[in-house]
């Protein structure tokens, strides 16, 4: 009886063990077939947080940083002339005084008197703003070193002096021709204190178109930009400049800008129109 009971018990236990084994085996198979959850490896863990921009929270006491206004941004930033505009003093050197654009009302620069040796002998006193006076003397000295005797015949003219000058030319040439050769008051580069009219003995110390073909005129044409000057009214550009060819009339714009003008092959008025002047 006891023996029979033992056998039954063993059989039941065996079945239970077998069932448990099959169950464990099945579960293990299911786990293996499902996609494993990826565990981050050290290389995928982000340890560097410095690249993450942390924006400060705005507080009511913070003053907002003012954005530049449109008028203070130069339209083209690749130009040396435009870079010159950053400085107020340099900006003054680039003011437009042409047929379309007048100088600000009552524009009167501070000028200095030029030493007599740079002026046409027996002529009236001549004035320029200091920076231009230095550049003009350097230009004339450099020309002299290469054997060219050049002097200044005209330089700064006040608004009133320009009135007299223009009235004189109207009387001499008539209004239409006077406008081609002389500026209406307020529109003259001479009022800037940055323009000079040069002459030499080859043109009898006058202001003549032939000056451009003399050795002095050719030297000026090839070297003026190195001293910060530009030729305002080149040959065959009257349609753009509004003035006849004036190989004697130079306007100072600073060396960076004069170099840019020279290399561009454009007229000075085109260069100045291309930059943003707000006045
Ligand atoms: Zn002139």
Image (cartoon, helix red, strand yellow):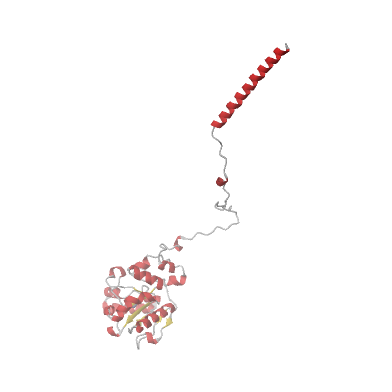
Q: Looking at the image, can residue 102 be seen?
A: no
Across and down, in percent, residue 101 comes to 37, 69
Across and down, in percent, residue 149 comes to 33, 85
Asked whether 32 or 118 is in front, the reply is 32
Q: How many marks?
A: 0
Q: Find residue 186 and report its image quarter.
A: bottom left
Across and down, in percent, residue 10 comes to 68, 18
- Quadrant holding the C terminus: bottom left
Q: Looking at the image, can residue 7 be seen?
A: yes
| Left or right: where 31 falls relative to 127 | right
Vertical position of residue 279 compared to residue 250: above or below = above
Asked whether 171 or 263 is in front, the reply is 263
Q: Find residue 5 and report its image quarter.
A: top right
Which residue appears at 38% of the width and 87% of the height?
A: 117
Across and down, in percent, residue 256 comes to 40, 71
Asked whether 197 or 109 is in front, the reply is 197
Q: Find residue 81 and report its image quarter.
A: bottom left
Asked whether 20 or 86 is in front, the reply is 20
């Amino acid at each position: 009886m006891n023996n029979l009971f033992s056998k039954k018990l063993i059989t039941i236990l065996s079945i239970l063990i077998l069932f448990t084994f099959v169950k464990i085996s099945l579960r293990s198979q299911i786990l293996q077939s499902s996609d494993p959850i990826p565990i981050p490896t050290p290389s995928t863990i982000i340890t560097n947080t410095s690249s993450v921009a942390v924006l400060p929270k705005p507080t009511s006491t913070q003053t907002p940083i003012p954005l530049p206004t449109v008028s203070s941004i130069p339209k083209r930033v690749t130009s040396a002339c435009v870079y010159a505009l950053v400085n107020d003093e340099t900006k003054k050197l680039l003011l437009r005084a042409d047929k379309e654009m007048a100088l600000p009302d009552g524009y009167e620069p501070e000028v200095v008197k030029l030493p007599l040796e740079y002026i046409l002998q027996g002529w009236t006193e001549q004035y320029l703003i200091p920076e231009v006076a230095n550049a003009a003397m350097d230009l004339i000295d450099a020309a002299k070193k290469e054997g060219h005797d050049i002097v200044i015949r005209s330089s700064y003219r006040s608004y009133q002096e320009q009135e007299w000058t223009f009235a004189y030319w109207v009387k001499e040439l008539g209004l239409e021709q006077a406008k081609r050769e002389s500026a209406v008051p307020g529109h003259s580069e001479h009022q800037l204190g940055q323009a000079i009219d040069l002459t030499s003995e080859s043109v009898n110390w006058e202001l003549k178109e032939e000056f451009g073909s003399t050795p002095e005129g050719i030297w000026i044409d090839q070297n003026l930009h190195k001293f910060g000057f530009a030729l305002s009214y080149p040959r065959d550009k009257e349609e753009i400049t509004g003035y006849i060819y004036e190989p004697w009339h130079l306007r100072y714009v600073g060396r960076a800008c004069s170099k840019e003008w020279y290399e561009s092959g454009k007229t000075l008025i085109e260069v100045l129109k291309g930059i943003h002047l707000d006045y």
